[in-house]
Structures are given as C-alpha cells and as structure tokens.
Amino acid sequence: MDNAVENRRKDASERYVSPAVEQASLILFSLAGARSTYMSLTEICANVGIHKSKAFTILETLQRFGLVRKNTDARGYALGPGLISLSRKVLDDMNAPILAEPILEELARKTGTTAALGLIADRNVFVAAKREGGGSIVVTMRVGHRFPLTYGCHGKAIAAFLPEKELAVLLKDKKLYFQGDPAKLDKDKIIKDIERCRKDWFAEDLEETAPGLNAVASPVLGPNSRPTGYIVLLGLASADTAHRYGPLVAEAGKALSLKLGANIVGEPGNRARS
C-alpha cells in the first residue's frame, strides 16, 4: 500500500483519539498485566511512556472513581474495586443471551410465535437473541436491531421496574415511544399500563405501535434488581392471545432475572420504587 495513503488512514483513525483517555487506558492495561500486585509510579511511567507528573494526575483521578487503588505505604498502585461493577455489567450482558436460549426456545415452541430478548444500551435497547416458533406466519426481527428504550410493550415493562425518581424523569421526556408516534401519546393510559405491569410482570402492545401488531413483554432484572432488558413475544394473533400468553412471558422474565442474580421476592412495585 502506498505510504501516503496509509498515513492518511492513520491520521483519520487517530483524529478523534483523546490523549488523556488513551494514556489512562494504557495505565489500566499496564496494571492488569503486572507480575506483582502493585506497580510503582516509575514502573508505570516506563511501561506507558509518559512523565511522572502526568501519570500521577491520571492515577489520582482513576483512584477517585475506584478504578485504581494505592498501596497502604503509598508506593504502588493496583487495579481498584470499581472495575468489578463495570466488568459485571459486561459479563451480565454477555451471559444473558446464553442463559435466555432455553427460555426463548420454550416460549417460541409453546406459542408458535417469535420470542426475543432485548438488552438496554443507554437510551436504546437492542435485540440480543431470538427464537422463532413453528407458526405458518411469523413476525420476526434481526438480532442487533435497535429500538428506543420506551418503545411499545418492552418500554412499559422496563419503565415499570425503574426506581420512582428515574421513572418520573423518564416520563418528562418529550419523545416517548410507548405507543409509537410520540405525538399520539396517551400518558394517562401509559401510567395505568405501567402500574398494571408492576403487579402482573408483563405489559401489552395491542396494535398501539403498528396496525395488526400484538406483542407482550416482561422485564428482565439484573443483580441489582434493576431492569437490564426484556423478553417479548411478537406476532400474537389478537388481544385475547396477548392476555393469555402474558403470564407465560412474565414467568420467563422472572426465570431469567433469577438466573442473572436478581432478587424478585416480594411486591415488585414496592421494590422498584425503593
């Protein structure tokens, strides 16, 4: 490859790299690869290739967030406990689709429809796994497809198990997709649906987001008993079918939540509001 072309590609790829974030990342990887528990400031600087003053500033900042801890004699640094919560989140998201496979398989087999697992990613959710039933007509979606966090029945199911303060903030958003078009939102109905989901563990979308589309979803909770995603059944024939399959989806959501370490004992609405 021509050197000029290669250099242009390199310049483009590095254009948006933050030197401070890059150096902090290199320090964390350096600590992770250390042979001993603690590394001295001198060793870290030699590994990363930065001055002591810069390394010290970064280490003190990382220590503030628990990502790095200092030895009691203040002569060395090691990875901090704050990384545990970050890694647990990654592992949970990686484990959830695997743990959900038999649950989705059973749901799809029993109902003849598509059962899917969605996981929360900031203000969106993405389809992480799916199983299609043996029906002659099946509504489906591709793995990796993203939806707004508040979209349809999965949005109601997630909202129902948010802490009360977070739910209040969420409901103030000007673009809520519980019923598809935000301009057509019936907030009173949505609040009633959320309250019902807290009691029943499932929420319904009865042709609210799209004509002819009926779906039912249950929340999936993580180790901290907060919503981490949802399980949904798609392509239900009617509202009556959604009502009938709702408890099945609720049990599926509870089963996966337990596998992920959630505590679902007690009244869900009370726990969600605490």
Image (cartoon, helix red, strand yellow):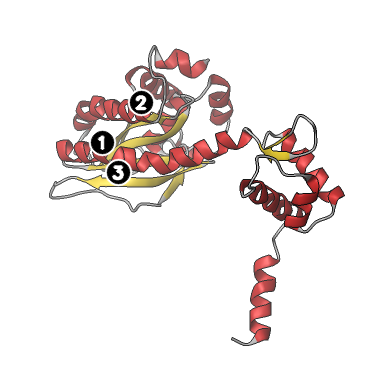
x, y percent for residue 222? 44, 30
User: Which residue is the site of mark 3?
Assistant: 211
Determine whether the residue tagged by mark 2 lies in a helix, strand or loop: helix
Whichever of callouts 1 and 2 sits on the residue coming sooner in the sequence is 1
Q: Is residue 136 above or below residue 229?
A: below
Horizontal side of 68 relative to 193 (left or right) equals right
Cα–Cα span, label 3 and label 2 = 34 Å
Disc 1 to disc 2, C-alpha distance: 12 Å
Tell me where residue 200 sits by quadrant.
Answer: top left
Image mark for residue 258: 2
Looking at the image, is mark 3 or mark 1 earlier in the sequence? 1
Look at the numbered disc 1 and give the secondary structure of its residue: helix
Residue ranking furthest to the bottom: 2
Q: Residue furthest front?
A: 36
The residue positioned 44% from the left and 24% from the top of the image is 160
Disc 1: which residue: 103
